Image: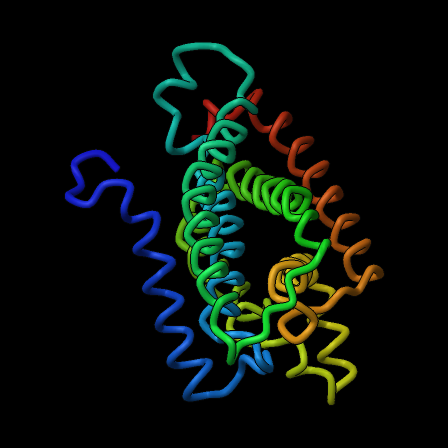
Amino acid sequence: YKQTILGPAWAVIQPLLTTIVFTFIFGNVAGLANCGAVPTFLFYMCGNIAWQFFARCLNGTANTFVANRGILGKVYFPRICMPISSTISQLISFGIQSAMFLIFLVIYLFVPEYQIGINWYALMAPVLVVQMALLGTGCGIIISSLTTKYRDLQFLVSFGVSLWMYGTPVAYSMDLFKSTAALHIIARANPMSPIIEMMRYGFLGGEAGSIDWLSYGWSWLLTLAILFFGVVLFNKVERTFMDTV
């Protein structure tokens, strides 16, 4: 946040404005929230904060080699430290945004017309955060490794992440696919879908999210597979990246 007027306040302003837009367009106009007595505003804020953390982890590590070629070509250190440090730094913004979400959650708990079913699954939030960090880092370092030869991927990352978001229940509820079995299976195959759903289930209750342990197990399996492949590819590319970057 160097040389910015509002500084760290952007960590709050960005998700807040995004949530307001989602609440109005997707919630009120399109009616895609389908969260019962749970506030639509909290429904979208929970999903947005989780997704933005994952997206920042992915985008922050996607240009590791290209963005840091100056220092990487002069000083030797384990190259994997760069994407790891980028991911860890995203926890600062995520912590600020999570605090904002909890403040709104407490406020809505005292509004009689809403029913928020916060439960013990909320304690799984740290595990879900770790998984999002691993998945985002894994995807990011795969892209970073490929961009040393194929620079076109730099232009596709932001576009691809946006498309991925619309394939994840951030702007809508998973109930939207219940009538179509094939679409429901495809949506559940997305490793981010059960994470978002479980996050909402824990903090907002069963009307806002759901628990599907089979999908969540698949999500972890895919996360670890992507991370493993990413680390292997990253270590292979780092030996020769100065010749191609």
The residue nearer to you, when weighing 168 against 62, is 168
Task: State the residue at coordinates (60%, 82%).
Answer: 36
Instruction: Please say if 78 is above or below 80.
Output: above
Instruction: Please say if 36 is above or below 2.
Output: below
Quadrant containing the N terminus is top left
Q: Position of residue 212 (x, y in %)?
A: 79, 65
The residue nearer to you, when weighing 70 against 108, is 108
Q: Does residue 150 appear to the left or right of 176 in the view shown?
A: left
| Colouring mode (rainbow / by chain / secondary structure / one colour) | rainbow
Task: State the residue at coordinates (48%, 36%).
Answer: 148
Q: Does residue 233 appear to the left or right of 141 in the view shown?
A: right
Instruction: Please say if 43 is above or below 27.
Output: above
Task: State the residue at coordinates (67%, 64%).
Answer: 201
Q: Does residue 183 appear to the left or right of 52 in the view shown?
A: right
Q: Position of residue 68 (x, y in %)?
A: 39, 27
The residue nearer to you, when weighing 191 against 159, is 191
Q: How many marks?
A: 0
Q: Does residue 10 appear to the left or right of 159 in the view shown?
A: left
Q: Position of residue 23 (x, y in %)?
A: 42, 76
Instruction: Residue at the far right: name it.
Output: 214
Quadrant containing the C terminus is top left
Quarter of the view holding residue 224: top right
Q: Position of residue 38 (x, y in %)?
A: 56, 75
Task: State the residue at coordinates (74%, 64%).
Answer: 189
